Amino acid sequence: MSFTVEERGRPNTQDYRVFFKNSEGKYISPFHDIPIYANEAQDIFHAVVEVPRWTNAKMEIATKDPLNPLKQDVKKGNLRYVANVFPHKGYIWNYGAIPQTWEDPNHKDSDTGCCGDNDPIDICDIGNKVCSRGDVIKVKVLGTLALIDEGETDWKVIVINTEDPEAASFNNIDDVRQLKPGYLEATVDWFKRYKVPDGKPENQFAFNGEFKNRDFAIKTVKSTHEFWKSLMSMKTNAGELNCMNTTVSDSPFCCSATDADTVVESACAFGPEDPVPSSVDKWFYYEN
């Protein structure tokens, strides 16, 4: 199963979009149409890379737009870039989401005591390869961190690309601690402090910032898949989410290929990119 992307609009502007196609060349939603499992028997999942490692543009699956293309987040009318909080440059992993998952904002998690953040579940890929925006990779789940972001549960699932040459050595969160010393501590530090340059307080964590193991993480991912199923069958109110899809045949939101083509054709034509503001390269320093 392979996927490709088609860019629309001008990169580094608010009209920029990245649409997805399946192996047949049909437009799909990365939120709803890419299967959660690459290999269900082995608990290997698909993941959509939104932000390649070392980059700053906060790209995300546009959950409220038809076909859910990638777009850059906007805050207060401006494109959002994540600050460089020393010693971290941009995102320190390939960052993305597992398709066909949803953190239900109406469900209070029994472990964290907070409701979901209304998005697909997030992943941090610790593999060696720096991925490209829109890559769909197959990942092995190693553990998870429970970020509490402005009162919402926002799981960060630690994964490794199964095509990584070292993937066989990583099977649980302790393997990361042993084989990539400092990476988990840096991950907690990154999530704790990345909003501070924007004037926000440090983020908090459930479980005192401790990572939960592989089994816990897989169970969490699978529970968000069940929430997604309820969303797609209209057992749960979608609210502002756009559930348009082209392959979930038993979903009332399933549309025709012609409808999907119309969505993409209505987007701006691909054009030259705008320059990235020089302020994106600024470093922020502060003591813990």
Image (cartoon, rainbow, N blue to C red):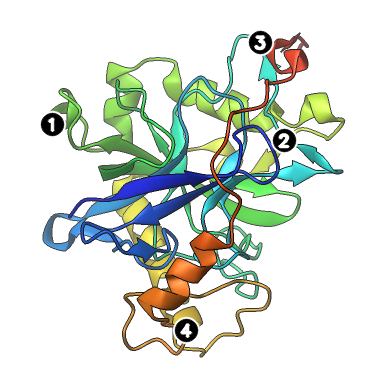
Give the CA distance from mark 3 to mark 2.
19 Å
**Residue under numbered circle 1:** 168
**Residue under numbered circle 2:** 80
Q: What x and y, as percent, mark residue 28?
A: 38, 64
Q: Which of 221 and 55 is in front in this view?
A: 55
Q: What x and y, as percent, mark residue 161?
A: 26, 35
- Counting residues from the start of the chain, the first of labels 4 and 1 encountered is 1
Disc 4 marks which amino acid? Answer: Phe
**Residue under numbered circle 4:** 253
> Can residue 216 be seen in the rendering of this structure?
no
Q: Which of 272 and 117 is in front in this view?
A: 272
Give the CA distance from mark 4 to mark 1.
39 Å
Q: Which of marks 4 and 1 is in front?
A: 4
> In percent of the image, x 70 and y 27: which residue is there?
193
Give the CA distance from mark 3 to mark 1.
32 Å
Disc 1 marks which amino acid? Answer: Ala
Give the CA distance from mark 3 to mark 4.
44 Å
Q: Which of marks 3 and 2 is in front?
A: 2
Q: What x and y, as percent, mark residue 219?
A: 35, 61
Instruction: Give SS at disc 2.
Output: loop
- Counting residues from the start of the chain, the first of labels 3 and 2 encountered is 2
Disc 3 marks which amino acid? Answer: Phe
**Residue under numbered circle 3:** 86
Q: Quadrant of residue 49?
A: top left
> In percent of the image, x 44 and y 67: which residue is there?
261
Instruction: Give SS at disc 3.
Output: loop
Q: Which of 103 and 232 is in front in this view?
A: 232
